[in-house]
Each structure stands twice: as C-alpha cells, then as structure tokens.
C-alpha cells in the first residue's frame, strides 16, 4: 500500500474514533492511545516501504511518512517521534547519496575534489548531530511516559544506539574539520604540515567503524510489544 493509501487509512481510523476520550484525556502510563498506535504504525509502514524500495521519490515519501505521526491531535510522544524520524531520514539521505557524490567529486581532480567534498562532510556532520539529538530527546519522552522493556526498545533508541550515535557525531565532525583544513591548505591559507594524509585515513577508519555500528543497530521488537488501547 502506497503512502496515499496509508494516509487514507489513518484518516479513516481517526474519523472512526471521532471525539473519543482517549484523544483528550492524558494517556495512561506505559500505554499508547489508539490514536498514537494508529499513527505510529502507519508512519513505520510508510517509512519501511520508502527506505526498502527507494523508488524515484523515496526521499519525499520517507519524509511524508514521518509527518504521518502529526495528523490530528498530537502528543509530546508523537511530536518527538516526528522530529526523530525526520532527523533519521536526513542522515539516511546523506549516507545513501554520498557514494555517488564522492565519485563525482573525485572526477574533478585533487584540489577540486576537496572543495567539492568539504560541504558534503559538513552536511553529514550536521545531520549526524541532529539525528543524535532527536534520539536523546525521544528516549527521554518515552521513558517519562512510563514505557519499559520490549516496548521501550520498540519506541526509542537503546543506550547502545545512543552511544553509537554520539560516536558518529564525533567522527563526522572530525572528518568535516579535516576536510576544511585541507581546503585551507589547498588554497594556500594553511601550511601543508598542518594535516597529513595518514591522519585523514585514520579518521576515516574511525568513521567507517562508527557507521558500521550504526547500521548494525536494530531492535527485534515491534510496536505490538507495546500495551495500547484497542483501535
């Protein structure tokens, strides 16, 4: 089912509950409301389809899936899920497009390659930081709502995932700093001895390790692990 169908299902489910007290009352601790469960389920399905198939408009489809969770009445949990989802998608876009961009920059020659790559590394560092910040805030909101165990693991990043995200922020910032120093060296604004290729290669190795850990991280639990009011 495409995103249009997913959003239609969300609209239908929301209209079906009408002015249900669950939308107005404070959610029970450790329990998703029917509204939250419906929207998060739809968003996860849409996001999975967009990122798995990566069709022509996969980036827009992924962002639209993230926005699904703010349809109708919002809650701090839904708002945090939206921010975290958009941050994760931005980082996914960077990582997906980077190989082709690197090849294109390399074809320009040594100096122009550096000038071409530096903004890409800066964007990667920025989006890594945003994704990590969203992860931290989301986990705090989920814990505050009283979710624990498998449900916590399904809704929020684990402590290990947060650690890996923090490490990725550090390594992308280091690489971005390296690239802009190389730009200054190439432009004659800094001495060549300020940074050598060996250090760049070492920092790249750290980044590759951190990225591998991020890609490894996943939760075996699904939203069905969470207590929720019947839809």
Image: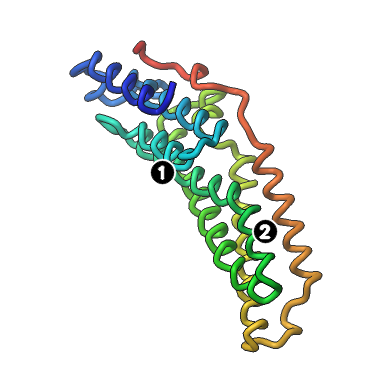
Q: Which mark is residue 83?
A: 1
Quarter the C terminus occupies: top left
In the image, farthest residue toward the left = 19
- Horizontal side of 44 relative to 185 (left or right) equals left
Above or below: residue 132 compared with residue 47: below
Considering every residue shown, the one lying at the far right of the view is 198
- The answer to whether residue 48 of the structure is visible from this angle is yes
- The x, y position of residue 127, in whole percent, is 51, 54
Q: Is residue 79 above or below residue 122?
A: above
| Number of numbered markers | 2
The reply to whether the C-beta atoms of the residues labelled 2 and 1 are less than 8 Å apart is: no
Residue 65 placement (x, y as % from top left): 41, 34
Q: Is residue 15 left or right of residue 141?
A: left
Residue 36, quarter of the rendered image: top left
In the rendering, at what x and y percent does residue 224 appear? 50, 17
Instruction: Please tell me in which quadrant of the rendered image residue 110 appears.
Output: bottom right
Residue corresponding to mark 2? 103
In the rendered image, residue 3, in percent from the top left (x then y), is placed at 40, 28
Q: CA distance from mark 2 to mark 1?
A: 31 Å
């Amino acid at each position: 089912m495409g995103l249009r169908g997913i959003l239609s299902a969300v609209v239908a489910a929301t209209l079906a509950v009408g002015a249900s007290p669950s939308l107005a009352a404070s959610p029970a601790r450790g329990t998703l409301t029917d509204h939250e469960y419906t929207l998060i389920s739809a968003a996860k399905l849409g996001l999975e389809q967009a990122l798995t198939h990566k069709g022509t408009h996969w980036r827009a489809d992924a962002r639209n899936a993230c926005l699904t969770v703010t349809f109708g009445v919002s809650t701090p949990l839904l708002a945090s899920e939206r921010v975290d989802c958009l941050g994760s998608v931005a980082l996914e876009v960077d990582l997906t497009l980077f190989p082709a961009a690197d090849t294109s920059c390399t074809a320009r020659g040594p100096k122009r390659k550096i000038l071409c790559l530096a903004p890409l590394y800066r964007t990667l560092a920025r989006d890594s930081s945003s994704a990590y910040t969203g992860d931290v805030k989301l986990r705090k909101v989920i814990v505050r709502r009283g979710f624990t165990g498998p449900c916590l693991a399904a809704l929020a990043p684990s402590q290990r995932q947060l650690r890996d995200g923090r490490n990725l922020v550090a390594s992308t910032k280091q690489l971005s700093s390296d690239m802009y120093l190389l730009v200054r060296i190439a432009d004659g604004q800094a001495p060549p001895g300020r940074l050598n290729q060996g250090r760049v290669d070492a920092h790249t190795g750290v980044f590759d390790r951190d990225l591998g850990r991020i890609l490894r991280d996943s939760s075996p639990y699904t939203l069905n692990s969470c207590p929720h009011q019947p839809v």
